[in-house]
Amino acid sequence: MKKALSMLPLVLALAGMSTVSQAQDAKGGDAAKGATKAAMCIGCHGLVGYQATFPEVYKVPMISGQGAKYIVSSLTAYQKGDRKHPTMRGIAASLTEQDMADLGAYYEQHGKGVGTAAPATLAKPAPDALKDRMAACVACHGANFSAPIDPTYPKLAGQHPDFLFAALKAYHTDGNAYVGRSNATMRSQVVQEADGKKKLTFSNAELKQVAQYLSSLPGDLRVVPQSRFR
């Protein structure tokens, strides 16, 4: 079990105890308690440049600075099977709602004061070929993709491009036991479905362009190294 946890591509990045306050989020998450529950994540998300190898190869996502409610939302999606990653599903299944809230509060605070905060306005325009189709992305994730209109939506700016590509591609992946996401809103952005047939709104090559663009934007997300031995 410990070995599995150390390989965990959890949508979480680890933080130092010195950065944690007793502040609580709107659902009662306690950042200090979250710090004591985050040890399972350090083996992947406390390491700069760490890559997941199963079921796909990509850098594990940065989540220090991510919104607390998005952390809870993503863990809940893994727990329910709306996201299929097998290791993540196993970990999420072990968490209570309180655990998720505490972890969310912890990660949202972690990374604050590290680096430069995301700008309030768009740092650079989307590629011309994608601009019109990405209008809906701006509408949900904010002008610079760092201020989502709904706190259960993620910040995207500055995230690893290979992870973003894998995540986007997962929304139009069907029939795979290990890869896939079933969020209806995101599904509708990458796939058009009619009469039982589907047509990709973005090709894989275009999804890579989207991912590279989002990654190039300055954002709040960080990888903050942390030792397992605290």
Image: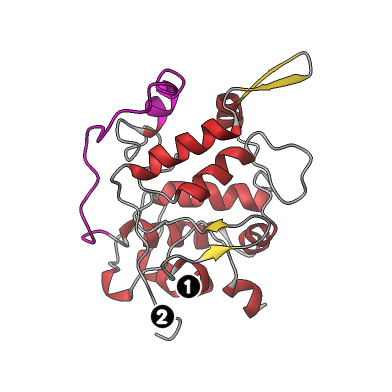
97 up-or-down from 33: above or below: above
Describe residue 119's horizontal placement relative to residue 224 as left or right: left
Which contiguous range is marked in magenta?
Answer: 112-140
Instruction: Determine whether the residue tagged by mark 1 lies in a helix, strand or loop.
Output: helix
Task: Give the amino acid type for the residue marked by disc 2 in the picture.
Answer: Ser
Q: Which amino acid type corresponds to the residue marked 1 in the rendered image?
A: Ile
Percent across and percent down for residue 218 are: 28, 45
- Residue sitting at 42 percent across and 17 percent down? 132
For the residues labelled 1 and 2, the Cα–Cα distance comes to 7 Å
Mark yes or no: residue 156 visible: no
Identity of the residue drawn at 74% across and 37% down: 174
Would you say the magenta stretch is mainly helix, strand or loop?
loop
Q: Position of residue 29 (x, y in %)?
A: 41, 58
Q: Mark 1: few, some, or many residues within 10 Å (few <14, many ≥20)? A: many
Q: Nearer the viewer, residue 100 or 138?
A: 138
Q: Which residue is mark 1?
A: 42
Residue 200 appears at what percent x and percent y? Answer: 64, 24
Q: Disc 2 designates what residue?
A: 227
Under circle 2, the secondary element is loop
The residue at the point 25 percent across, 58 percent down is 112
Please say if 2 is above or below 62. below
